[in-house]
Image (tube, rainbow, N blue to C red):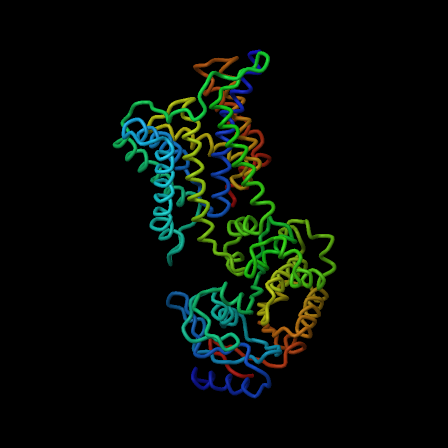
């Protein structure tokens, strides 16, 4: 039952990409800035908890809460200092290319600090759900994988309900679609930008914590996660979290199948070749043009 | 006419109105960098009035509304029903009864028409259920029955006239006591413009104070009983 197990593994990986893609899309919707640092918050989550628990000897719940609090406070400070100057000042910076650098630089900054604090070795947060993998017939389910999937469902579902069924969610969408129109309706667009930036940073950190026991993280792992989440978000034109979620799952499953059937070594190369071919063949359908024009 | 004399003339023109003062503007100036768009405008609008702000394009009419509602920073004082409005706080103005229907509508193009309208309620509630059941939201929908078949359609795909109706309906959903409408007929066919003006007349008849910015005084005066003329950023009585 190799196929089934590969699909399960792919769905677990894909759900991580999906959540990061949703985080990128939702924040892009509200701020019109691509967050390339989202994966770095995941890395900080994983290595931060590992460091506080294993090296500093804090109890696990305290290590998790402290790490998440640090991520939230850092995201808040970054919004208040950098994004506020860049977006709310008299000379507002706009355009996907210019604003790209704010989070690109942030990503490098976080990586640098992480290298100093955590070193260059592979580490992982301790597994939150220990035990042998669960089996159902010939299918195997890693406990950590199921935890990742559960978190993805909760986060994805919560975003979906929030955007679709609450006035706050619609205000969030309005903030991204037309900031002037949003202000006219009395919507505080800065508050939403801040809220979602902090929220997605904490969500990313949580995923780093639950996922790192599967793959292990180094200080550079964030960039790869960001890139794949970013790619999945691009397939949804950066503005469609639902499509980004599906794209994330698709990439995860495709990656697992290619790794299993084609080549473990060159799986990623083939994967990115297929993704590039898809974009070339069907740019409008995949939302790339709308992302660029917006 | 000097700025000072223009300002006092505008004030005098509006002071003779009966009823309590809905909006009092004194010494309002709005600048964009070094460009002064509005200079020292003073006028009052009584409760229940319909006031036209007229003048050629690019003379500062819209900037007056932007300054009054807090969309841009201003100098001078704005009072809404006797309470001093904080500078640059649109939400405060909306919560105290002054809502703007802006030039070029400023809708959310990918959101449905219904979502656009319901977001007007955001200034007084965070509950979507409460907003849907509310009087202002119901009245906003009732005013434009022709929008009903299009409520689920993305606002960006509606015709210009329908978009203007959505913008006015969003303004009404905020439950305004004063509705400030900026160039409501810009780019609309005459028949549609008439329909928009009919709707504004009904809003006024229902007791809402209206401020309408119009390039064409003739059309504005079919609805309005007062007029403030703006020339080169200076407001004066007409």
> Residue B238, image x and y in percent?
56, 83
Image quarter for residue B217?
bottom right
> Residue A174, image x and y in percent?
54, 51
- Name which residue lies at 52% across and 30% down: A150
Q: How many marks?
A: 0
In front: A243, or A12? Answer: A12
Q: For this view, does A20 lie left or right of residue A136? A: left
For the view shown, which residue lies furthest in the left direction? Answer: A116
In front: B43, or A59? Answer: A59
Q: For this view, does A12 lie left or right of residue B31? A: right
- Name which residue lies at 44% across and 76% down: B77
In front: B6, or A103? Answer: A103
For the view shown, which residue lies furthest in the front direction? Answer: A59
Image quarter for residue A126?
top left
Establish if A211 lies above or below A29.
Answer: above
> Residue B42, image x and y in percent?
47, 80
> Residue A33, image x and y in percent?
44, 44
Establish if B5 lies above or below A288.
Answer: below
- Name which residue lies at 71% across and 57% down: B147
Q: For this view, does B39 lie left or right of residue A290? A: left
In front: B6, or A201? Answer: A201
């Amino acid at each position: 039952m190799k196929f089934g197990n590969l699909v399960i593994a792919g769905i677990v990986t894909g759900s991580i990409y999906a959540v990061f893609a949703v985080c990128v899309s939702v924040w892009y919707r509200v701020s019109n800035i691509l967050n390339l640092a989202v994966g770095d918050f995941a890395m900080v989550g994983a290595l931060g908890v590992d460091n506080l628990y294993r090296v500093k000897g804090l109890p696990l719940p305290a290590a998790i809460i402290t790490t998440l609090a640090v991520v939230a406070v850092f995201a808040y400070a970054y919004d208040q200092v950098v994004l506020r100057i860049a977006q709310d000042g008299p000379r507002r910076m706009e355009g996907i290319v210019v604003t790209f650098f704010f989070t690109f630089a942030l990503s490098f900054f976080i990586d640098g600090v992480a290298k100093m604090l955590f070193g260059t070795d592979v580490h992982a947060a301790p597994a939150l759900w220990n035990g042998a993998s669960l089996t159902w017939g010939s299918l195997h389910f890693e406990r950590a994988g199921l935890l990742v999937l559960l978190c993805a469902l909760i986060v994805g579902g919560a975003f979906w309900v929030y955007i679709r069924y609450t006035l706050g969610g619609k205000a969030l969408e309005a903030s991204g679609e037309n900031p002037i129109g949003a202000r006219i309706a009395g919507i505080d667009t800065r508050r939403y930008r801040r809220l979602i930036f902090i929220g997605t940073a904490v969500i990313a950190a949580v995923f780093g914590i639950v996922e790192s026991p599967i793959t292990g993280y180094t200080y550079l792992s964030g960039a790869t996660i960001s890139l794949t989440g970013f790619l999945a978000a691009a397939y949804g034109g950066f503005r469609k979290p639902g499509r980004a979620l599906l794209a994330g799952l698709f990439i995860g499953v495709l990656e697992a199948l290619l790794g299993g059937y084609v080549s473990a070594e060159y799986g990623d190369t083939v994967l990115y070749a297929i993704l590039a071919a898809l974009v070339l063949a069907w740019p409008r359908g995949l939302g790339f043009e709308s992302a660029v024009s917006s | 006419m000097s700025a000072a004399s223009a300002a006092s003339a505008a004030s005098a023109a509006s002071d003779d109105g009966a009823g309590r003062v809905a909006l009092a503007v004194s010494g309002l100036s709005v600048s964009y960098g070094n460009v002064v768009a509005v200079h020292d405008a003073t006028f009052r609008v009584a409760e229940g009035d319909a006031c036209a702000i007229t003048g050629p394009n690019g003379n500062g009419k819209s900037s007056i509304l932007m300054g009054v509602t807090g969309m841009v920073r201003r100098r001078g004082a704005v009072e809404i029903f006797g309470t001093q409005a904080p500078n640059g706080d649109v939400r405060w103005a909306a919560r105290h009864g002054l809502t703007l229907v802006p030039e070029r509508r400023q809708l959310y193009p990918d959101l449905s028409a219904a979502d656009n309208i319901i977001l007007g309620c955001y200034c007084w509630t965070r509950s979507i259920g409460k907003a849907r059941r509310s009087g202002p939201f119901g009245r906003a929908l009732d005013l434009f029955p022709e929008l009903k078949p299009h409520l689920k359609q993305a606002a960006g795909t509606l015709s210009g006239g329908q978009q203007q109706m959505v913008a006015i309906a969003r303004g009404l959903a905020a439950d305004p006591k004063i509705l400030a409408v900026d160039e409501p007929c810009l780019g609309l066919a005459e028949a549609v413009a008439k329909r928009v003006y009919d709707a504004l007349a009904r809003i006024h008849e229902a007791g809402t104070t209206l401020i309408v910015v119009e390039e064409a005084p003739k059309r504005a005066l079919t609805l309005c009983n007062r007029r403030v003329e703006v020339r080169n950023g200076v407001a004066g009585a007409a």
